[in-house]
Image (tube, rainbow, N blue to C red):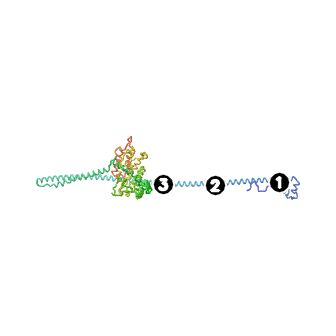
Amino acid sequence: MSSPLRSSEPSRSTTRSDTSRHSRYGSRNGNANGYHRSYRESTAESPSRQLWDDFNRMIQDGNKAFTQELDTKSSEQEKLHRQALEQALQHHEKVRQSAERAREQLQIEIELENRRREEEEKRRLEEARRKLAEEETAKQRRELEEAKRREEERKQQEALRREKEEQLRRVEAQKQREEQEKSERKAAQEKEEADRKAREEAAAKAKQQEAQQPKAPPQPAIKPAQSAPSQTQPHAGSSAPATQQSTSKEAAQGLVSTNEQREAIHQKYLALHKHLKKVRAYVEDECKKRGIKNQLSDMRREVNKIMGQINKHDKRANLAKSKEVRAILDQAANMSDISVDPTEFILYPEQPPQSTTAETRYPGCLLYLLSRFAKSAISQLIQEAGMETETADGVGVLLVTIFSVPTYRWNGQSLIDVLWAKYHVVCPPLFGITGNQKTVAGRKRLGWWVEGDTFLPEELHYQRMRGLGAGFSALTLRDFSRSANPNPAPNRLWWESMARILNLPPGQPQLTHYVLVKALLADHIPRILQIFAYAGKAVIRKATAEFPLKGPRRENGMPFSEVTALDSLPATLASKQGLML
């Protein structure tokens, strides 16, 4: 590109000089026109002409130098312009690339923001769905609980109605018996009076006949015939009360036991608990020799896991868990040839033996898992039922279900003493063992647990007792009337434990006993009334009205909260269940 300062026309100086030179002095080739002479001639002829030519050459050289300088400057300016343009283009490209990157970054940020908003919207939607599902589940649970509560109220009202009807029937029957006895006494008196008159008349006639006929023999047949009922009737009447009295005495001897007898039974169960530890170690060693110890350990862990999945609301799910436990125990029964003597683990059988010649062999792996199963159940009651006693019912159902299975019995007798041995260790007061919880020895006798070298705090101890008491009621208050299997934990065990606590003399009941009594009653009132009827209501009244009067007091004479909690149970029952004691 040419410079704007450079003209495209020939230089003026060059044109003018050439014109002047051609026009005025002629051509350089020496030719002259008609009026001028040649250059050489003029140069040679005139010095001034030479000066004039030199001056012209000097001017021409100046013009050439100026023109060259202008061309040089123009080319340099053009170069600078091109460099400036290149730099401008490069800067523009950088700006364009920066703008492009900014646009891409903005686009990415917009996409990320859109994704975040979509995820946030999705999360809010999922949260709303979850809350809706939770509300629906809670609503269904409330409806189920309300239906259950109404059903329990209906059952309680039905039980109360039946109780009232039964009481009315008993009163009516008593009245009828009294009227019948009165009429029978009246008839007997009339008959006796008639007999007496007949005997008197007969005697008078006999005397008269004897006076008239002195030699005639007397006829005593009438007197023995009439006196036989009077001789046999007192004998029959006296035999019935004697039989009833002997039966009552035997029943009382069966229900009442001395402290020495209870202590001896307690020590037997403690010895069984220690023996079970040795047997478990023996089974583990034998399984290790046979290469099945890992399999046995996996089965034990599976049983513990199932025990931790017991649901306090879903009975159908608990039934499925019971089947899973039975499948594991069935596998253990046929796992190996390891066997133990079952008679060592049956101290007080609830059922008579089926045979006197049964072989004293029992699958060792099955006994091992039953012992672990009982231990896991006790831990579940302590940890879960201690904080929420309603969870104890599912554990109790599972325990009695497993220990009632005929295939897990030996010679018709359940091995539930394995469970009772653990219960004797952790909760002795249920079996009539007493002690002063303010002393170290007394706490040990009451089952106050020790961690390290120190006893547990009171709140944790009472929490353990609540769970164990609720679990004991869940075990021993089951109805097996519709089951083909015998009950391994009969209802009388609950009655014996409650009676042994409630019959403690004043000064002996500890706060531990009051926590246990409330746990034994709180969630099981309908079942107690269903099983024991009017006697159950009487024992509830005794536990809530009379037993708190024996409780320990503070220094200011006020009762402890554990005692008042039991004392306020009737008000709770009246408000929640409509049961008036």
Q: Position of residue 15 (x, y in %)?
A: 81, 56
The circle on residue 57 is 1
Q: Give whichever of 562, 341 is nearer the camera.
A: 341
Mark 2 falls on what kind of element?
helix
- For marks 3 and 1 on the same chain, the one whose residue lies earlier in the sequence: 1
Residue shown at 55%/55% (left/top)?
A: 115
Q: Residues within 10 Å of mark 1 (few under 14, many from 20)?
A: few
Mark 1 falls on what kind of element?
helix
Residue shown at 82%/54% (left/top)?
A: 57
- For marks 2 and 3 on the same chain, the one whose residue lies earlier in the sequence: 2
Label 2 amino acid? Gln
Residue at the outermost right position: 45
Mark 2 and mark 3 in contact? Answer it, CB < 8 Å: no
Residue beneath label 2, please?
97
**CA–CA distance in space, label 3 to label 1:** 107 Å
Question: Quadrant location of the N terminus?
Answer: bottom right
Closer to viewer: mark 2 or mark 3: 2
Residue at the outermost front position: 289
Q: Give whichever of 214, 382 is nearer the camera.
A: 382
Q: Is residue 220 visible?
A: yes
Residue shown at 38%/58% (left/top)?
A: 407
Q: Give whichever of 426, 470 is nearer the camera.
A: 426
- The reply, left or right, for residue 350 in relation to residue 90 is left
Q: Position of residue 185 (x, y in %)?
A: 23, 52
Q: Position of residue 134 (x, y in %)?
A: 46, 54
The circle on residue 130 is 3
Q: Give whichever of 181, 494 is nearer the camera.
A: 494
